[in-house]
Image (spheres, rainbow, N blue to C red):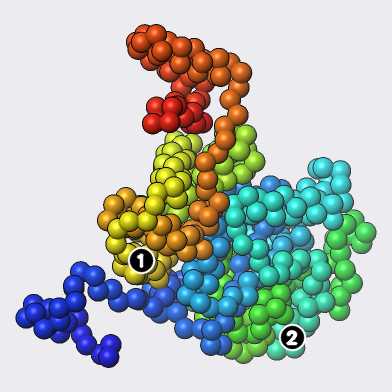
């Protein structure tokens, strides 16, 4: 009936009462658990509306190319979405596009990144946003990231942002300085809850100067243009001509598309202390209720132990990796090998290992597709293990181990294995269905070497043939001797 405990079933098996039952084959499917930054706990996921999930992910500031660190954040959101889909939820996913108001410092200081880029490249802010958004979308496609349902742009939601600020003003949460309208963080008692920020300490220790702001943690909702007509992007508002602060777009647009209370909000770990803390403050003060149930953050991709940056390095784009002979899927595979909650230490050596492991996997899958069906069916067992790993806070390293073990399990019928792998690929997104023998077009020089090796082998000059094989390898191709003759593939 499904009400037996495992101990009871094991006991029955031991006494021979339950002939068919093999305890090691028993798998209980776990419910989905996710680590919530808000509670610092792994929690069972419970949706607000049965069977439906509303999910918002902080997207790119489209003033420049997105680097592989950013891509890790989108791959993580994609993984979470795919796991939700695998658990048969319907997901509405919103990814915002920041094309105004993100200053060079996350804390409302410095220049507007978009305006700065437009000036530097001699283009309009609109052209800059259009150009980098297009490349962003191309990179998502290369990485096989499922498209969001909506990509709302901050500059196209000025009305909604002004309305939100007016609401906060009416409720007494705002004040004006000479350069903008600010949110008074001391008025929201839960202000530091996400980042576990101790507000008292910040207020007392007024050693740092924060200009006209009342509290260090206060932030701009609206910034005034210093001189009308000097900025490209500015709007009239009840507060004065200017532009919205960076955080307000995410509150206004998430509410518009997902409602005042929705399920999941994602972003990189850098957003916990400022951006998401401020988003909670704006949304919850405006509506008087909790805005998001699960805040989930992906740890950074690092380079030589530090945050990727111009000075420290590691700022590759997907196109740059491609230029160096990698495929976007190699990067996807690398990301799957680490848990989203741990920093991913990136290096080209790590990417090489991932590329090789992924090629090995591909070759095995292609072989499996060619083998006929023989052997047992362990789909339930492997399927259960795979889902349990993912449902355990998206543990992809364990899920990948299950996949690799399963590929090598010779007792498992090959065609059933392929079917299951294709099902798993709904989460992995590695293109398992499309994996097939690639016809390599050999460069002329390599072809000549291959022919020469064949000739030497026919003459039984084995040692010389091996030397030529090494030369072919140095050119980037591997020769395999198979029953039907030879097979050449790219390394
Ligand atoms: P941005 O374009 O700077 O607003 O960032 C877009 C997304 O990438 C945000 O969710 C960031 O938190 C995330 N992000 C930025 N740098 C990294 C990194 N090195 N590793 C992982 N995520 C990052
Ligand atoms: Zn955001």
- Report the residue marked by disc 2: 167
- Rendered view: 471 above or below 403: above
- Looking at the image, residue 258 sits to the left or right of residue 273; the answer is right
Q: Residue furthest left?
A: 15
Which residue is painted at 31% across and 64% down in the image?
378
Which residue is painted at 43% across and 72% down in the image?
34
Q: Residue furthest right?
A: 229
Image location (x, y in percent) of residue 370 = 44, 47
- Looking at the image, residue 23 sits to the left or right of residue 193; the answer is left
- Rendered view: 84 above or below 466: below
Q: Nearer the viewer, residue 369 or 257?
A: 369
Which residue is painted at 32% across and 50% down in the image?
408
Image location (x, y in percent) of residue 157 = 79, 72
Comparing marks 1 and 2, which lies closer to the viewer?
1
Q: Nearer the viewer, residue 270 or 95?
A: 95
- Report the residue marked by disc 1: 379
Image location (x, y in percent) of residue 224 = 82, 66
Q: Quadrant of residue 470?
A: top left
- Looking at the image, residue 248 sits to the left or right of residue 404; the answer is right
Q: Residues within 10 Å of mark 1 (few under 14, many from 20)?
A: some
Q: Count the labels in the image.
A: 2
Decide which of tag 1 and tag 2 comes sooner along the chain: 2
Callout 1: SS = helix
Callout 2: SS = helix
Name the quadrant of the N terminus: bottom left
Image location (x, y in percent) of residue 202 = 52, 69
């Amino acid at each position: 009936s499904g009400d037996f405990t495992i101990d009871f079933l094991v006991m029955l098996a031991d006494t021979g009462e339950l002939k068919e039952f093999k305890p090691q084959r028993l798998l209980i499917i776990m419910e989905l658990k996710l680590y919530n930054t808000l509670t610092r706990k792994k929690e069972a996921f419970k949706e607000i509306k049965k069977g439906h999930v509303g999910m918002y992910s902080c997207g790119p500031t489209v003033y420049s190319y997105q680097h592989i660190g950013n891509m890790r954040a989108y791959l993580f959101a994609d993984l979470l979405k795919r796991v939700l889909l695998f658990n048969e939820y319907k997901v509405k996913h919103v990814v915002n596009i920041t094309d105004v108001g993100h200053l060079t410092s996350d804390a409302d200081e410095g220049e507007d990144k978009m305006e700065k880029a437009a000036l530097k490249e001699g283009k309009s802010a609109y052209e800059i946003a259009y150009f980098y958004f297009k490349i962003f979308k191309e990179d998502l496609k290369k990485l096989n990231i499922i498209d969001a349902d909506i990509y709302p742009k901050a500059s196209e939601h000025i009305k909604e942002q002004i309305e939100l600020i007016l609401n906060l003003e009416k409720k007494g949460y705002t004040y004006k300085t000479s350069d903008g309208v600010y949110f008074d963080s001391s008025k929201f008692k839960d202000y530091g809850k996400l980042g576990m920020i101790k507000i008292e300490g910040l207020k007392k220790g007024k050693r740092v100067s924060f200009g006209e702001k009342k509290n260090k943690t206060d932030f701009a909702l609206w910034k005034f243009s210093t001189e009308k007509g000097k900025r490209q992007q500015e709007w009239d508002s009840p507060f004065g001509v200017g532009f919205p602060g960076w955080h307000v777009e995410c509150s206004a647009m998430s509410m518009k598309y997902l409602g005042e209370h929705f399920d999941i909000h994602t972003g990189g770990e850098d957003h916990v202390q400022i951006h998401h803390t401020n988003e909670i403050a704006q949304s919850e003060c405006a509506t008087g209720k909790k805005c998001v149930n699960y805040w989930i953050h992906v740890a950074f991709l690092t380079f030589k132990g530090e945050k990727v940056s111009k000075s420290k390095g590691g700022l590759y784009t997907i196109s740059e990796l491609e230029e160096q002979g990698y495929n976007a899927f190699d990067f996807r595979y690398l990301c799957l090998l680490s848990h989203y909650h741990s920093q991913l230490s990136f290096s080209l050596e790590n990417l090489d290992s991932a590329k090789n492991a992924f090629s090995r996997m591909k070759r095995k899958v292609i072989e499996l597709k060619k083998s006929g069906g023989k052997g047992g069916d362990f789909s339930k067992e492997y399927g259960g293990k795979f889902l349990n790993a993912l449902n355990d806070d998206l543990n992809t390293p364990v899920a990948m181990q299950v996949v690799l073990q399963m590929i090598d399990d010779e007792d498992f019928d090959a065609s059933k294995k392929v079917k299951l792998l294709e099902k798993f690929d709904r989460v992995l997104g590695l293109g398992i269905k499309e994996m097939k023998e690639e016809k390599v077009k050999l460069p002329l020089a390599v072809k000549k070497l291959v022919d020469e090796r064949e000739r030497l082998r026919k003459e039984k000059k084995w040692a010389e043939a091996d030397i030529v094989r090494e030369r072919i390898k140095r050119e980037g191709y591997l020769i395999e001797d198979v029953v039907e003759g030879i097979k050449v593939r790219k390394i």
